[in-house]
Image: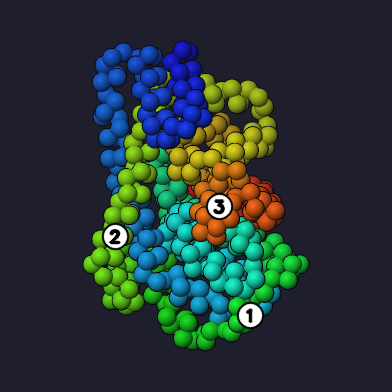
């Protein structure tokens, strides 16, 4: 009992004290193991940290991070913006709709909400400002729509989920996230267009519409990236990890030979930046392995799950409590860390109520996506607000509407699980 209190209590205290989440996970796990188990178990801490990341599917995470950064630096985002402008045309709220469409497409390359937000905000916010959109509104729209990257494959968070939940097919998860991801994008678009019309925001700076044919040809290399990733997975040509390798090399071909926007210096820079981000993610996963093993061995997660189940035997009530917890967590912690921290607790609850693991994984992703742009601490909104040059407080009046809309979309997925499960079942994946 004492060790369990140390595990959870130390983690919460360290987190509130501002300790980096990886360090908080590792220290609380080590402290609990040393108090609750013998020294032989403590001697295995190094092995636990290593074995947490010595998993073949995890190779996909740094590779997809690299893929997203390559497509960001190779000029793909600018070409996608021109194509979206050609499709949408000059209309009230049109430029905001362009930002949403580009976020959806870029999400199919990066798998990361903050990376998606940074790439699109850098390109779109100056144009939206010239068109008369308030900075805070532009930051809110892009932050909300970039959150769909955690749903649309290749989602880094869903990769982590597939590794932590035994027996879940990552291909089924990717397929299951696609329709809810598009639904989330639609949920952001509806209030965005309504607000644009209500406040009279213009569509574009000069109202000109790029030629559709030329814009489509220029954007074609970028559009092919999601097709290659998802098509290769569906055909069985390569595994998710191999898909990440193919995506990296395809991105380099686009940047170096097709767009000719990347030379040796740019390639080195993108490799270094991707390595830095990947190191942070893998360090979190490694130290979370110590935390998870300690909690499982000491029975802390089983006790916490039993407490939650004792509060109610109604599946809907418990699901609502879980969703509320995840929403609050999503406001302050990144998506990957939330999966690592909460899944050891949530798996017994899933088993108790017989929740479909694929559906629940997508539902978790939708919930975390909402948290990524919900103040006070919202990773996507922090990125876009910084680029727009506004404080997060200024975005509250605008961002509340996409938050409510996406919560409504999430409620639809709760009420109708086939929204998530239909596509993977139709493709023949085990759900």
Separation (CA) of disc 2 from disc 3: 25 Å
Q: The residue tagged with tag 1: helix, strand or loop?
A: loop
In the image, farthest residue toward the right: 198
Q: Residue furthest left?
A: 264
- Nearest to the observer: residue 395 or residue 100: 395
Residue with the mark numbered 2: 269
Q: Residue at x 55, y 81 (%)?
A: 86
Give whichever of discs 1 and 3 has the lower sequence position.
1
Secondary structure at badge 2 equals: helix
Picture coordinates of residue 143, whole percent (x, y)? 56, 56
Could you say where residue 262 lies in the image, as x and y percent from the top left? Answer: 30, 70
For image coordinates 67% across by 63% down, the residue present is: 192
Q: Mark 1 sits on what residue?
A: 90
**Above or below — where is 352 with respect to 90?**
above
Who's the residue at 48% across and 64% down the image? 122
Location of mark 3 (residue): 381
- In terms of secondary structure, where does tag 3 sit? helix
Looking at marks 2 and 1 on the same chain, the residue that comes earlier in the sequence is marked by 1
Task: Mark yes or no: residue 28 visible.
Answer: yes
The residue drawn where x is 33% and y is 51% is 62
Q: Residues within 10 Å of mark 1 (few under 14, many from 20)?
A: some
**The image quarter in which residue 140 lies:** bottom right
Image quarter of residue 314: top right
Mark-to-mark CA distance, 2 and 1: 36 Å
Mark found first going from the N terminus, 2 or 3: 2
Which color scheme did the rendering employ for the protein? Answer: rainbow
């Amino acid at each position: 009992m004492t060790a369990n209190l140390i595990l959870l209590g130390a983690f919460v205290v360290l987190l509130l004290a501002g300790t980096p989440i990886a360090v908080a996970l590792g220290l609380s796990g080590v402290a609990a193991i040393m108090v609750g188990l013998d020294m032989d178990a403590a001697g295995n801490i190094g092995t636990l940290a290593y074995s947490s990341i010595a998993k073949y599917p995890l190779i996909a995470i740094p590779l997809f991070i690299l893929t997203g950064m390559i497509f960001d630096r190779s000029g793909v985002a600018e070409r996608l913006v021109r194509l979206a402008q050609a499709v949408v045309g000059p209309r009230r709220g049109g430029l905001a709709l362009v930002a949403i469409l580009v976020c959806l497409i870029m999400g199919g390359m990066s798998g990361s909400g903050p990376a998606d937000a940074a790439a699109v905000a850098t390109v779109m916010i100056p144009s939206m400002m010239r068109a008369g959109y308030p900075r805070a509104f532009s930051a809110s729209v892009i932050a909300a729509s970039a959150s769909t990257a955690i749903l649309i494959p290749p989602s880094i968070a869903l990769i982590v989920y597939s590794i932590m939940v035994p027996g879940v097919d990552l291909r089924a998860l990717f397929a299951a996230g696609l329709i809810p991801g598009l639904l989330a994008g639609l949920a952001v678009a509806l209030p965005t267009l309504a607000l644009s019309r209500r406040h009279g925001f213009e569509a574009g700076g000069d109202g000109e519409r790029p030629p559709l044919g030329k814009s489509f040809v220029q954007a074609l290399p970028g559009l092919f990236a999601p097709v290659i990733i998802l098509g290769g997975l569906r055909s069985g040509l390569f595994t998710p990890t191999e898909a990440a390798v193919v995506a990296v090399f395809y991105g380099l071909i686009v940047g170096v030979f097709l767009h000719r926007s990347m030379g040796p210096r740019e390639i080195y820079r993108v490799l270094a930046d991707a390595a830095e981000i990947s190191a942070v993610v893998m360090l979190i996963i490694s130290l979370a392995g110590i935390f998870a093993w300690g909690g499982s061995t000491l029975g802390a997660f089983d006790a916490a799950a039993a407490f939650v189940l004792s509060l109610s035997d109604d599946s809907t009530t418990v699901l609502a409590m879980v969703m509320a917890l995840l929403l609050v967590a999503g406001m302050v912690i990144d998506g990957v860390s939330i999966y690592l921290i909460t899944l050891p607790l949530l798996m017994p609850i899933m088993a108790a109520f017989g929740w479909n693991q694929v559906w629940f994984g997508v539902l978790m992703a939708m919930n975390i996506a909402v948290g990524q742009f919900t103040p006070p601490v919202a990773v996507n909104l922090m990125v876009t607000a910084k680029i727009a040059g506004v404080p997060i407080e200024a975005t509250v009046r605008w961002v509340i509407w996409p938050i409510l809309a996406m919560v409504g979309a999430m409620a639809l997925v709760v009420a109708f699980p086939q929204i998530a499960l239909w596509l993977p079942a139709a493709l023949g994946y085990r759900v």
